[in-house]
């Protein structure tokens, strides 16, 4: 069982930055592909993911050039740096983990473990 705990959300103005963090309890954290999703309505939307095996991170088009996902395996932590925030980025942001996932990083059903979520609100 893997526990994920997100932090770093808050209320900011358009154009501001936030950094979300997600700490995992997994003993083999380096073997988990980590993703960030967000939910503002009924559906959970993919934001970004980083492979367990390294390589280029993967982003949804709407955040490319503004958001950066990174991981620190020594700290069992994945980050989401969010710059140039827009009101449409407002959502609950969730961290997710999948052991050894190598494809379809944007599919929430492929992630077995989820955090409790952290609210991000961007005012105009």
Image: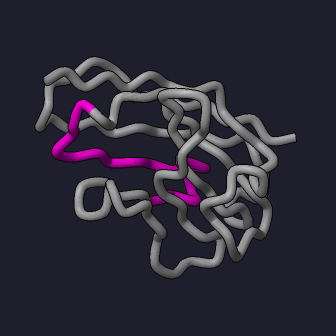
* In this rendering, position of residue 60 left or right of residue 5: left
Chain part drawn in magenta: 70-87
- Front position in the image: 109 or 52: 109
> Which residue appears farthest toward the bottom when viewing the image?
55
Q: Position of residue 111 (x, y in %)?
A: 75, 52
Colour convention: one colour
Residue 72 position within the rendered picture, expressed as x and y whole percent measured from the top left: 50, 57
Q: State which quadrant residue 10 falls in.
A: top left
In the rendered image, residue 5 lying in the magenta stretch gets the answer no
Q: Position of residue 47 (x, y in %)?
A: 47, 52
Report whether 77 appears left or right of 24.
left
Percent position (x, y) of residue 77? 55, 48
Q: Is residue 72 magenta?
A: yes
Position of 98 with respect to 5 (left or right) is: right
Is 86 rendered above or below residue 73? above
Residue at 54% x, 39% y: name it.
22
Up the image or down, 94 lies above or below 96; here it is: above
Task: Give the residue displayed 43% in from the left and 28% down from the top.
Answer: 91
Q: Is residue 51 left or right of residue 68?
A: right
The residue positioned 54% from the left and 31% from the top of the image is 6
Position of the C terminus by quadrant: top left
Which one is in front, 62 or 13? 62
Name of the residue lying farthest toward the front: 42
| Quadrant of the image containing the N terminus | top right
- Residue plotted at (27% across, 18% down): 11
Q: Is residue 67 above or below residue 102?
A: above
**Count of numbered circles on the image:** 0
């Amino acid at each position: 069982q893997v526990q994920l705990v997100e932090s770093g959300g808050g209320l900011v103005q358009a154009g501001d930055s936030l950094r979300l963090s997600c700490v995992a309890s997994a003993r083999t954290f380096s073997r988990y592909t980590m993703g960030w999703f967000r939910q503002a309505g009924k559906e959970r939307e993919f934001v970004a993911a980083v492979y367990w095996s390294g390589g280029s991170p993967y982003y949804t088009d709407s955040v490319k050039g503004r958001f950066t996902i990174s991981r620190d395996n020594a700290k069992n932590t994945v980050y989401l740096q969010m710059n140039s925030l827009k009101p449409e980025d407002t959502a609950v942001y969730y961290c997710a983990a999948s052991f050894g996932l190598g494809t379809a990083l944007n599919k929430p059903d492929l992630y077995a473990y989820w955090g409790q979520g952290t609210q991000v609100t961007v005012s105009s």
